[in-house]
Amino acid sequence: MRVVSGIQTTGNLHLGNYLGAIKQWVAMQDQVAAKGGDCLFFLADLHALTVANDPKDLAAHTIEMAATLIAAGIDPARAILFNQARVRAHAELCWILQGTARMGWLNRMTQWKDKAGKNREGASVGLFTYPVLQAADVLVYKATHVPVGEDQKQHLELARDIATKFNTDFGVELFPLPDPLVSEAAPRIMSLRDGGAKMSKSDPSDMTRVNLTDTDDLIAQKFRKARTDPEPLPDTMAALADRPEARNLVTIYAALADRTSQSVVEEYAGQGFGTFKPALADLAISILAPIRDRIAELLKDSEAVQAHLRDGAARASALAAPTLKEAQNAVGL
Ligand code: ADP
Ligand code: NA
């Protein structure tokens, strides 16, 4: 079993990223290790180049995100943690796979359509070919499983199509088809001010999200000011169906406490948000404060964080090199 997953280096990680992605990676690291498999987690700095990029920010975000992942529980001795740009096989295999991927396939990608919007002529070429780099990211390690959210399923499907066509065109059995790993536990966390929007780093208002670097006071304030309704909590999740903001706070509580949402509403049934919000804030602080403090501690010695990334890149390169060689041989390079 080999699990590969990446996260774009864009800074400002929030509670949605933690509960929806990072916490799942930490759990996966233990489960996969128990089965004798490998986990590779990378910071997708090459992907970050497909949109407007400030070179100073990119370097800083890469280090901050590495520190965040380690602080949240990724163990760089067990998992392979690295940044994509340092393992050249990603970009080299991507170029080879661009000979296999079809324009029509990429044209159908809904993320491309969403991200390019109406200005397709002005979008970067990299934004269009982004899913081919994603295919290379996983195929270069012959990944067996790729953790994906709903929004990335189409890109993994594309990676499987590219792998199949490559294997067929060149008469090789080089790339196994990676399977999606859909985590049942991964919740979708919504904005604290608008239950219809995802909690996101791109939301202009900072009060809509809890950042992993927020102080205890700010975390408490953000939950206190979170939009809710005047009704007390019911005793079933089903009764929260048309109360998205209330449901979101229960979802956050349950995910932080590793409990089911149903058990949380049962505990607080009949109580209002005057009781629930402070309990949620205390719980969030008890989990996020140690992570925040470890991030700060790790960033005091950024050279040590760099050393982890260099070590991860060396281990990843050793795994990627034979696959790249086989791909080069297959196409006649
Ligand atoms: P953002 O939406 O803030 O720009 P990204 O798109 O960079 O975040 O996502 C990084 C990872 O965090 C992905 O695995 C994504 O599925 C997860 N993620 C992002 N926002 C949320 C959210 N609100 N709830 C759950 N998971 C999320
Ligand atoms: Na996003």
Image (tube, rainbow, N blue to C red):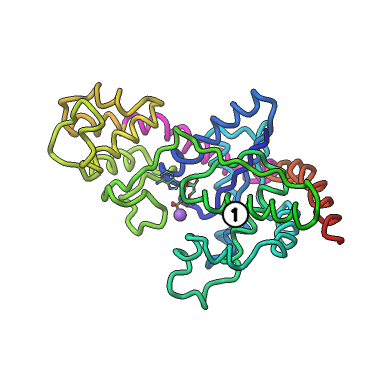
Q: Quadrant of the N terminus?
A: top right
Work out whether residue 54 can be spotted: no
Q: Residue at x 35, y 59 (%)?
A: 204
The location of residue 128, given as percent across then percent down, is 57, 66
Front residue (pair 45, 25): 25
In this picture, is 136 found above or below 261?
Answer: below
Asked if residue 126 lies left or right of residue 172, the reply is left
Instruction: State yes or no: residue 295 in magenta.
Output: yes
Asked if residue 28 lies left or right of residue 261, the reply is right
Asked if residue 232 lies left or right of residue 214, the reply is left
The location of residue 108, given as percent across then percent down, is 52, 63
Residue 99 figure quarter: bottom right
Front residue (pair 296, 35): 35
Q: Residue at x 84, y 52 (%)?
A: 325
Work out whether residue 239 can be spotted: yes
The residue most toward the bottom is 121
Front residue (pair 204, 113): 113
Q: Which residue is mark 1?
A: 158
Q: Residue at x 29, y 37 (%)?
A: 249
Provide the secondary structure element on which disc 1 rests: helix
Specify the principal SS of the magenta part: helix
Front residue (pair 177, 325): 177
The location of residue 329, given as percent across then percent down, is 86, 55
Magenta residues, start to end: 282-308
Labels in figure, total: 1
- Dot 1, crowdedness within 10 Å: few (<14), some or many (≥20)? some
Disc 1 Cβ-to-ligand 1 distance below 8 Å: no
The location of residue 2, given as percent across then percent down, is 67, 36
Q: Amino acid at mark 1?
A: Leu
Residue 34 figure quarter: top right
In this picture, is 82 found above or below 30?
Answer: below
Instruction: State yes or no: residue 178 in magenta.
Output: no
